[in-house]
Image: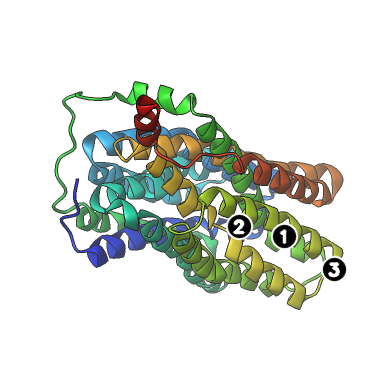
């Protein structure tokens, strides 16, 4: 549908939703140590819960995206917000590993599928013209980075001053803000077409699965999830193990969020002019180089901050490019669902990254093996993105019919 809302209005509410949802999510690594100490857990208990969160987020995302495509994003955002609140409250009162897995893992994971990129981008795709999508998605992805930059020091201050339990209660209240923000974002949108005319969701998915570029994009996104969630959750603990002050990890996560603002925004702009597959290849390859240098050079607070800043530039810069390719190739009718399936792969990677981090640490006393896996996967993802075709299926079919 043509845009009927001012561009600034769409971007503002979309950005605020992602800022709140992603900002809270990026603080969970700070709860690992205090909650584990309070309940006498090993690191694998908390790691498994966050791993389940990422897996459930990914598993539910195609369905949340489909519901947004079919019935509108507003209801999905409302339900996701309420589930986020319930999950954070449950996390605060969890005293067992099973309780943490159910609340922080299952409930919050499902909640995030309704309040983050796929659903928000589904709404944006129907409100914005095609030539502005990559740029706009870059801005909204950058808002998620700003949420990390803002919420990590806030969470650290709240945990230090009020404790982790009260901090989770405050975050539950914050998550409820997505209800009015979702209402504002979707105000004035035309009702989705549910008549069943045209291509069905099943046909759209079958078409996508037969497109080699979609499969390659999906496999590459697995690597993104593995790398960023492993680093986001385990980096503070890794630095503590190496003898650095706890504040170094907090500052590092905040720097990742700060520089990610510039990285995602720049990726969105560059995606309007350069082939997105080449940009994705460069991002994944650069991550492997940066991680390798971080491990090879002497570990100091300065080296950590430089690593965090550079990784921040590469952190979520894959998000606008990946989603823009899906919209460019397949259109926006089922953008929420198709980008949700790509994101599911991302979250399988996230599950393995965060869980293996805890599992291998508990069994070997070191994160070395997982760091090595991150480096190897980055190279593989770079190669996977090179052959992707970015032209729309419609234009390819039109060209083939004229031959």
Count neighbours of disc 3 (C-alpha within 10 A) and say few if under 14, some if 14 to 19, many if 20 or more: few
Indicate the position of residue 334 as horizontal and vertical percent values: 33, 35
* Quadrant assignment, res 32: bottom right
Check disc 2 and report its element: helix, strand or loop.
Answer: helix
Residue located 44% across and 51% down the image: 88
Going by the image, does 58 lie left or right of 234?
left
Residue located 19% across and 24% down the image: 197
Q: Which of 74 and 333 is in front in this view?
A: 333
Q: Can residue 238 be seen in this view?
A: yes
Residue position for label 2? 29
Q: Are marks 1 and 2 in contact (CB under 8 Å)?
A: yes
Residue position for label 1? 237
Distance of label 1 from label 2 (alpha carbons): 9 Å
Q: Which mark is residue 264?
A: none
Q: Nearer the viewer, residue 153 or 76?
A: 76
Q: Residue 297 carries which label?
A: 3
Indicate the position of residue 91 as horizontal and vertical percent values: 49, 49
Q: Which of 276 and 168 is in front in this view?
A: 276
């Amino acid at each position: 549908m043509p845009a009927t809302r001012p561009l600034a209005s769409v971007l503002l509410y979309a950005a605020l939703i992602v800022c709140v949802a992603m900002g809270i999510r990026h603080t969970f690594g700070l709860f690992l140590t205090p909650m584990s100490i309070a309940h006498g857990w090993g690191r694998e208990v908390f790691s498994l819960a966050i791993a389940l969160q990422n897996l459930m987020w990914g598993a539910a995302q195609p369905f949340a995206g489909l519901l947004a495509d079919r019935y509108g994003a507003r209801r999905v955002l409302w339900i996701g917000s309420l589930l986020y609140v319930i999950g954070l409250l449950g996390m605060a009162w969890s005293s067992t590993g099973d309780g943490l897995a159910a609340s922080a893992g299952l409930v919050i994971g499902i909640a995030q599928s309704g309040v983050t990129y796929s659903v928000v981008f589904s709404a944006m795709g129907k409100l914005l013209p095609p030539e502005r999508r990559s740029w706009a998605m870059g801005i909204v992805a950058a808002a998620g980075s700003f949420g990390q930059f803002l919420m990590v020091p806030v969470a650290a201050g709240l945990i230090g001053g009020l404790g982790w339990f009260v901090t989770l209660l405050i975050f539950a209240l914050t998550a409820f803000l997505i209800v009015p923000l979702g209402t504002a974002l979707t105000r004035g949108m035309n009702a989705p077409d549910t008549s069943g005319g045209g291509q069905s969701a099943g046909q759209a998915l079958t078409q996508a699965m037969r497109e080699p570029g979609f499969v390659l994009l999906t496999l590459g996104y697995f690597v993104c999830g593995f790398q960023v969630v492993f680093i986001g959750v385990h980096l503070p603990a890794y630095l503590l193990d190496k003898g650095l002050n706890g504040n170094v990890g907090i500052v590092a996560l905040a720097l990742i969020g700060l520089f990610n603002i510039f990285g995602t925004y720049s990726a969105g702009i560059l995606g309007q002019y350069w082939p997105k597959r080449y940009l994705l290849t460069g991002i994944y390859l650069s991550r492997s180089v940066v991680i390798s240098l971080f491990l090879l050079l002497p570990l100091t607070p300065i080296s950590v901050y430089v690593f965090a800043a550079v990784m921040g530039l590469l952190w979520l810069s894959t998000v606008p490019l990946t989603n823009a390719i899906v919209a460019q190739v397949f259109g926006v009718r089922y953008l929420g669902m198709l980008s949700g399936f790509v994101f599911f792969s991302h979250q399988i990677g996230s599950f393995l990254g965060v869980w293996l981090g805890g599992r291998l640490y508990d069994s070997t006393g070191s994160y070395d093996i997982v760091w090595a896996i991150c480096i190897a996967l980055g190279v593989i993802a770079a190669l996977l993105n090179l052959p992707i075709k970015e032209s729309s299926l419609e234009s390819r079919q039109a060209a083939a019919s004229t031959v």
